[in-house]
């Protein structure tokens, strides 16, 4: 069955946002060494800033991925703006666990790229946590290239 992208509804976002806030907080805690509480606060603040009006937030494309009418995942993009005037940005892409390993994420990105091209956007960027090797391989295979990299080294306690 072919995968399609459909505009997300407020109810869908409310449901999906719960998992997004939690998984983003977990990633922030792991990648930045934040406490779970601090990571949760940061997650809520960032997502709230980027989605101030939910699905009606200006410059935001929220799409659910459907296969034969069944939701298999979703993608969140923003159009070029003052922060990123030359490119659109993938903030999140998720394939629901029962549907992983079937090429849905690849298809979602390809469909998003086509929608962006129709809107006159010619560049697409994203961030990926360094420990997410599955996503890194996918993005690399789709032609994304590293343009910046952050590195962290934990320091031993003083003696």
Image (cartoon, rainbow, N blue to C red):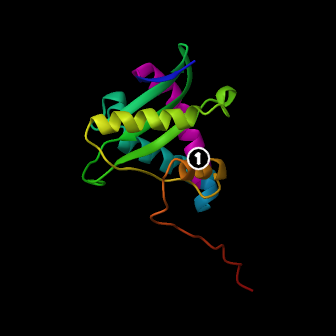
Q: Residue furthest bottom?
A: 159
Relative horizontal placement of residue 37, taking residue 77 as reference (left or right): right
* Residue at (55% x, 45% y) in the render: 24
**Magenta region, mostly helix, strand or loop?**
helix
Residue 34 visible in the displayed image? no
| Residue 55 placement (x, y as % from top left) | 36, 28
* Residue at (35% x, 50% y) in the render: 123
| Residue 131 placement (x, y as % from top left) | 65, 56
Q: Residue furthest right?
A: 159
| Residue with the mark numbered 1 | 138
Residue 73 visible in the displayed image? yes
Q: Is residue 79 above or below residue 5?
A: below
Quadrant where the N terminus sits is: top right
Q: Quadrant of residue 105?
A: top right
Q: Depth check: 30 or 79 in front?
A: 79
SS type, badge 1:
helix
Q: Depth check: 147 or 9 in front?
A: 147
Q: Depth check: 124 or 26 in front?
A: 124
| Residue 83 placement (x, y as % from top left) | 29, 55
Q: Residues within 10 Å of mark 1 (few under 14, many from 20)?
A: some
Span shown in magenta: 8-28
Q: Is residue 51 above or below residue 98?
A: below
């Amino acid at each position: 069955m072919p995968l399609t992208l459909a505009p997300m509804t407020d109810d869908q976002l409310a449901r999906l946002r719960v998992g997004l806030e939690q998984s983003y907080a977990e990633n922030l805690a792991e990648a930045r060494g934040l406490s779970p509480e601090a990571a949760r606060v940061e997650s809520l603040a960032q997502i709230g800033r980027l989605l101030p009006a939910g699905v009606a937030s200006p410059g935001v494309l929220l799409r659910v991925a459907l296969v034969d009418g069944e939701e298999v995942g979703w993608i969140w993009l923003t159009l070029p703006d003052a922060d990123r005037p030359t490119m659109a940005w993938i903030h999140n892409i998720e394939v629901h666990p029962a549907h992983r390993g079937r090429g849905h994420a690849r298809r979602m990105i390809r469909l998003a790229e086509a929608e962006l091209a129709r809107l006159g956007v010619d560049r697409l960027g994203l961030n990926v946590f360094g420990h997410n090797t599955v996503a890194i391989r996918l993005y690399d295979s789709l032609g994304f290239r590293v343009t910046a990299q952050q590195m962290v080294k934990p320091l031993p306690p003083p003696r």
